[in-house]
Image (cartoon, grey):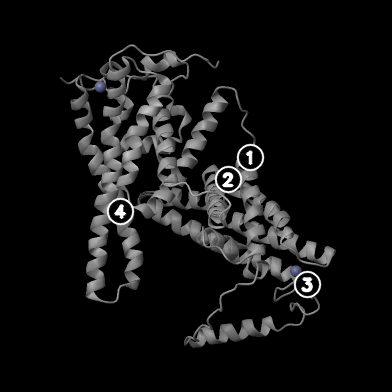
Amino acid sequence: MPVQSRPILPYQCNQVIHPWHESCIGAACSLTKPLFKESFRIYCALYAIAGLIRLRKVKTLKQLRQRLIGFVLETVQSTMFLAVQGLFFLPTCCGGRKIFGHISYYKLYFQIIFCTLPGIFIERKQRRGALALYMTNLAVEVLFKMAVHRNLLTPLHNGEILIFAIASSIYTFILKTTSDHKHNSLLFSVIKSLIGKEECAPSLSIELIPKSKEKSVFFTLFYKYIKIIKHWPLIQNKNHPICNHKYHCFIHVLLGFLKRFLAGILIQMILHFTTSPIQFLQHPILFFSTLYKKGFNLGKFLGFYSAIYRLTSCLLRNILKYDRPEHGLIAGYLAGFSMIFYKSSTLAMYIMGKLLESIYFKCAHDGKVPIIPYFDSILYALSTALVLHAAVVEPQAMRPAYYKFIERLTGGYFSQVDRRMMDCYGVCSSKLFPNYKLPLMKK
Ligand SMILES: [Zn+2]
Ligand SMILES: [Zn+2]
């Protein structure tokens, strides 16, 4: 039952927010070690992987030294960004309790902004946009779950597929209209490679002719064989002035499916081997059975996406006898339903978020909408405050993996918050903690 009124809590902050330590400063200090340790571990691993990938471009010793210095500075800066927010979190909550004399459901949200806003300004400017997008996605998910819990919304069955289909239709429409994608170029090139460059607007840039590489005897024979097949008149696309693709429509669709299907299986296998290498050593049978169960999902998703898109496009071209960017809207929308094989609300929300972001930047670039200064930082601060607020008073509305991340970051202290006291807010704050035990209070 939704409760409209949100009473205020007249308790001391050490009775509710930090029952593990009597003093506010002591409680905040106990978070210091896990915060810095975990933040450093996360960013060290993240930047080490990114650094290894970028290592290919290093040619001289000077460049290597610059990269190493950059790695250290980036790690320290990002560690500070994450840890400082954690360090400021309790003081902002306790400060509000001292100023207002109570803990209020709504005021707590605005108090938390005082820890997220300074935090984001510590992080590098280039990373703020990506962080804002990630946290906004999480915040939208939290708001959605909150609305469902309050009976304001009913979850739509397969809603993520619909979101993905709508985003996909707009992406493919843009891809068919222009080849200029300054913003969000990575995602545009991923979708372009899924549907094939023949299905997109011709590129404006002059493509360089790749240098011929020396191949082994085996590969030379293999390529010769493929070349012979390519010249079969049956598979050539000669009598079709509207379809631009090289081969017959049927082969075009089939090739689209097969290539992406195999690529999907390969990606899934690599992901499976890198995420659970210990399982491979300890329980190889279980490892391969889970690989077999999940192994084809990504392949089917990518394969059907490409095939449905190409099939619809070719059908439209054959029936209407012309090709227009509007076809991309229909073909992209229908292709989006291939997500049924790889359902992911995170992916759907990310793709939609990136689309909205690129539309905003395009409009801002054309002078149609004003550029709001520090928009990404403000968005990050508001979204992160919402997520953290939910983590305290309504953790069931959060993505479980993100709650576990906060829990790890705070050294387990986050689950020691006495949420039974907050149940009077009417949002079932203690729902996830039925066996909660009050920790021993340090003085
Ligand atoms: Zn306190
Ligand atoms: Zn065709």
| Point 43% across, 50% down: residue | 129
Q: Earlier in the sequence, mark 4 or mark 2?
A: 4
**Label 4–label 3 contact, CB within 8 A:** no
What residue is shown with label 3?
A: 242
- Lateral position of residue 68 relative to residue 155, left or right: left
Q: State the SS at label 1.
A: loop
Residue furthest to the left in view is 443
- Left-right relation of 288 to 406: right
Q: Position of residue 245 (x, y in %)?
A: 70, 73
Question: How far is mark 4 from mark 2, CA to CA?
Answer: 28 Å
Q: Give the foreground label among 2 and 3.
A: 3
Q: Callout 2: 10 Å neighbours few (<14), some, many (20+)?
A: some
Badges 1 and 2: C-beta atoms under 8 Å apart?
A: yes
Q: Secondary structure at mark 4?
A: helix
The mark nearer the N terminus, 4 or 3, is 4
Circle 1 is placed at which residue position?
A: 158
The relative height of residue 300 versus residue 12 in the rendered view (above or below) is below
Give the mark, 2 or 3, whose residue is nearer the N terminus.
3
The x, y position of residue 151, in whole percent, is 59, 22
Image region (quadrant) for ligand 1: top left
4 vs 3, front mark: 3
Q: Earlier in the sequence, mark 1 or mark 2?
A: 1
- Could you tell me the amino acid type at mark 1? Asn
Q: Which residue is tagged 2? A: 343
From this view, report whether residue 166 is shown above or below residue 419.
Answer: below
- The residue where tag 4 is placed is 45
At label 3, which amino acid type do we have? Answer: Ile
In the depicted structure, whether residue 432 falls above or below residue 199: above
Label 3's element?
Answer: loop
CA gap, disc 2 to disc 3? 35 Å
